[in-house]
């Protein structure tokens, strides 16, 4: 394969990622898909509608990803989520920080992009703070603290931490076969739970859940199948084109927002190139804006007071630090990571949910004291 061929494939990957991210943004805008909102609905009013949409998106992503593993198209070990080193304290702690922060900031990274597409200027402030704190946790001051503390606590597994690989090593079966069977089984159980109640059978839940889950699957295919190069002509190493990690990637928001800011600030630096993660940020924003304008729901919104600003600043900071520490956000770990059936992703997801519930309880306590 020639270098010119790689450039052509990279261009296709970037346009494909932008288009799929735009679909995500439009769907999230029209169906009100939101992880924080789903948790808040359950805690505050006992409404499980958006939670069922989120679970349906997870089920779709799990079935799609593991179906491709079963077909031999991709391998979980090529992602950042399924390595043998289980950073259990990082994923759990980062998830807790992110979950608490997303409530203070009125939404996670993806929801902030969707809100910004609808004219919410508070979301712009959150995204800038998230980008700065997230990039600092990747390579700056908080990165040093992360590596020296939570990242130092880990469990080294003999094989990858995704369930199909672990079970295949224990049973002696082939990983693709285990992945296909396990992915279908877990996906069907989750779909059955979604359908169990009438609110899980609405068109909005299925359009949002299946559509957003399919976007994640599409990005896995783009990066893991189309962008996979067994031997790069320059480095002679296996690589994945147009990704920041040089590994297989799907949709995420925490680190890519930081990379997007870095690309904008150092645009004239030839080493700063577009990646699937960076263009996905623009795609989500563009799709959400298009949907908001089409539905005539676009309107400008700003901060109500200084306390509102302070909450969003703290929330954005916690999301940046927590999202990078946990190796992903509600989308990065909560959809893309969990689709690999990774143990670390399950811990991150549990941490995000627990952090979100704690923040909602904290806000309720604050309101009660003010009355």
Image: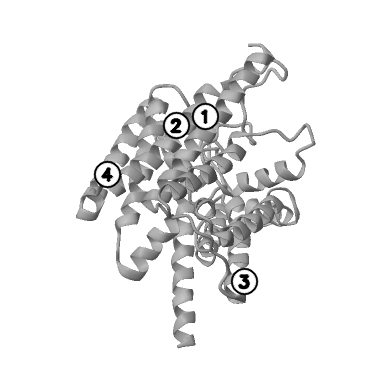
Q: Position of residue 333 (x, y in %)?
A: 49, 47
The residue wearing badge 1 is: 16
User: Which of pointers 2 and 1 lies earlier in the amino acid sequence?
Assistant: 1
Mark 2 Cα-neighbour bin, 10 Å: few <14, some 14–19, many ≥20: many
CA gap between label 2 and label 4 equals 20 Å
Residue sitting at x 43%, y 66%: 357
User: Which of pointers 2 and 4 lies earlier in the amino acid sequence?
Assistant: 4
Mark 4 or 1, closer to the camera:
1
Query: Which secondary structure, mark 4?
Result: helix
Q: Which quarter of the picture shows residue 239?
A: top right
CA gap between label 4 and label 1 equals 28 Å
In the depicted structure, whether residue 20 falls above or below residue 345:
above
The residue wearing badge 2 is: 218
User: Which of pointers 3 and 4 lies earlier in the amino acid sequence?
Assistant: 4
Q: Are marks 2 and 1 in contact (CB under 8 Å)?
A: yes
Q: Is residue 321 visible?
A: no
Q: Is residue 319 visible?
A: yes
């Amino acid at each position: 394969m020639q270098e010119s061929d790689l450039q052509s494939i990279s261009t296709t990957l970037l346009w494909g990622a932008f288009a799929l991210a735009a679909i995500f943004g439009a769907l999230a805008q029209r169906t009100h898909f939101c992880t924080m909102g789903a948790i808040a609905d359950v805690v505050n009013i006992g409404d499980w509608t958006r939670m069922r949409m989120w679970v349906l998106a997870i089920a779709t992503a799990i079935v799609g990803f593991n179906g491709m593993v079963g077909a031999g198209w991709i391998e979980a070990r090529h992602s950042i989520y399924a390595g043998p080193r289980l950073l259990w304290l990082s994923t759990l702690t980062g998830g807790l920080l992110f979950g608490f922060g997303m409530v203070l900031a009125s939404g996670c990274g993806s929801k902030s992009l969707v809100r910004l597409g609808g004219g919410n200027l508070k979301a712009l402030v959150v995204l800038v703070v998230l980008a700065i704190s997230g990039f600092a946790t990747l390579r700056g001051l908080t990165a040093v603290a992360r590596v020296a503390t939570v990242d130092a606590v880990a469990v080294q597994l003999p094989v990858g931490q995704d369930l199909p690989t672990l079970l295949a090593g224990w049973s002696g079966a082939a990983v693709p076969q285990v992945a296909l069977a396990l992915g279908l089984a877990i996906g069907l159980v989750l779909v059955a739970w979604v359908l169990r109640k009438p609110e899980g059978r609405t068109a909005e839940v299925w359009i949002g859940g299946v559509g957003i889950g399919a976007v994640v699957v599409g990005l896995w295919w783009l990066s893991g199948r189309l962008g996979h190069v067994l031997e790069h002509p320059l480095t002679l190493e296996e690589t994945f084109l147009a990704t920041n990690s040089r590994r297989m990637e799907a949709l995420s928001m925490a680190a890519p927002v930081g990379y997007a800011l870095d690309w904008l600030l150092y645009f004239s630096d030839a080493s700063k190139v577009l990646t699937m993660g960076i263009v996905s940020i623009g795609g989500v924003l563009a799709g959400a804006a298009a949907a908001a304008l089409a539905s005539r729901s676009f309107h400008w919104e700003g901060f109500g007071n200084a306390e509102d600003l302070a909450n969003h600043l703290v929330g954005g900071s916690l999301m940046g630090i927590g999202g990078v520490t946990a190796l992903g956000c509600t989308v990065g770990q909560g959809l893309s990571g969990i689709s690999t059936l990774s143990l670390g992703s399950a811990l991150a997801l549990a941490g995000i949910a627990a952090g979100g519930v704690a923040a909602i309880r904290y806000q309720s306590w604050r309101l009660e004291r003010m009355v």
